[in-house]
Amino acid sequence: MKVASYNGCKVYNLSSGKTAPQWMSQSKRRALQKDDEYRRRVELIQDFENNTASQCIAMTRDCEHIILTGTYPPVVKCFTTSDMAMKFQRGLTCEVVAMETLSDDFGKLVFLQSDRSLSFHAPYGTHYSLRVPRFGRDLVYNRENCDLYVGGNGNEIYRLNLESGQFREPFTIGFEGVNKMHINPVHGLLGLAGDGGVCEFWDPRSKNPVSHLTLDNPLGGNMNATEIKFDADGLTMAVGTSNGLVYLYDIRSRSPVYSKEHQYNLPIVNI
C-alpha cells in the first residue's frame, strides 16, 4: 500500500498496489503467493455499496460471506469474500433496523424491520414473516437455546423460540426502552443497554435479572446507554452512551476500570 503523510495524518492509497487480472490461471496465482508484494496487496470488493445509505453490515460465522442492508430502496446484498464479488441481491418491503445470521453461512437470516416485523430469509428468498408487539431497536440470537431476543420500546424483551416456533414469556426489565443487547460469548450472560443510562444483565435460565447497573453521567443532561459489548475473555465489558462516553468494566465490579470521553457529543453506535 502506498502511504502519504499530510500534516501528520497518514493517507493510504488502496488502489496503488499490484493486483492480479481476472483471466490469470490458478497455477500462476499460486506461484504469485510467494511474492511478498503480491501477498501484501489490498483487494476491493466490487459494488460494495448501496444507492443511498447502508444500515447494517455483518459477516457470517464461517467468514465467507458479508451481509449488507441499505435503504432507498430497502435492499439486502450478500458478498462472497473468496470471489470478491456479490452473490445475490434482494429487495425488501421495509427498512432494516437490525439483523442476525442464524446459521454459519448466509442460508438463514432474520431482519428486524421498522414496521415491527421479523422477516426470515432462506437461500431461495423470504421464508416467513411475523410481527412483534412493539417497535424493536435490536435483536440477538441465543444459539444455546434457539431463542431470538427482541428489545425496543417498553419494558419487555420478547423471546421467540425458533425450535418450537412459539413466543416464550418475555423478560420484564426494570427500565423503559432497550437500545442494544449482547450475549457474553463465554457464559451466555445477556446484557441490555437502555434509556436513562441503565444496564441490566440476565441469565436466560432465570426469570429475574442477575444484576443492575446505572452509569455515571459527569457531563450532565439526559444520557442513554446506546451500546454494550462483551469481550472474548468473558469478564471484560464496554458500554457506550448517547453523549459520547465509553466505559470499560470488569463484570465483577460496579466501578469502571477506564472511561473515555470522545468530545463530539454524538452517540456511540458500535464498539
Image: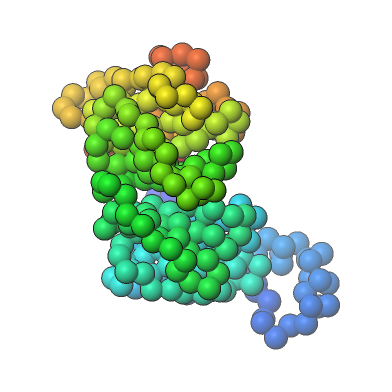
112 left or right, relative to 217:
right
Of residues 159 and 49, the one drawn nearer to the viewer in this rendering:
159
Residue at 81% across, 71% down: 30
| Quadrant showing the C terminus | top left
Quadrant for the N terminus in the image: bottom right
Farthest residue in the left direction?
221
Give residue 195's position: percent from left, percent from top.
Answer: 25, 32
Colouring of the image: rainbow
Seen in the picture, residue 168 relative to 15 is either above or below; the reply is: above
Q: Quadrant of residue 32?
A: bottom right
**Residue drawn at point x = 29 percent, y = 24 percent:** 174
Tally of numbered tags:
0
**Camera sees residue 117:** yes
Residue at image point 42% right, 24% down: 207
Decide if residue 20 is on the left or right side of residue 213.
right
Q: What is the x, y in percent for residue 88?
A: 51, 74
Q: Is residue 269 left or right of residue 265?
A: right
Residue 153: quarter of image: top left
Residue 15 appears in the rendering: no
Residue drawn at x 41%, y 44% is 167
Q: Nearer the viewer, residue 3 or 265?
A: 265
Q: Is residue 112 above or below residue 94?
A: above
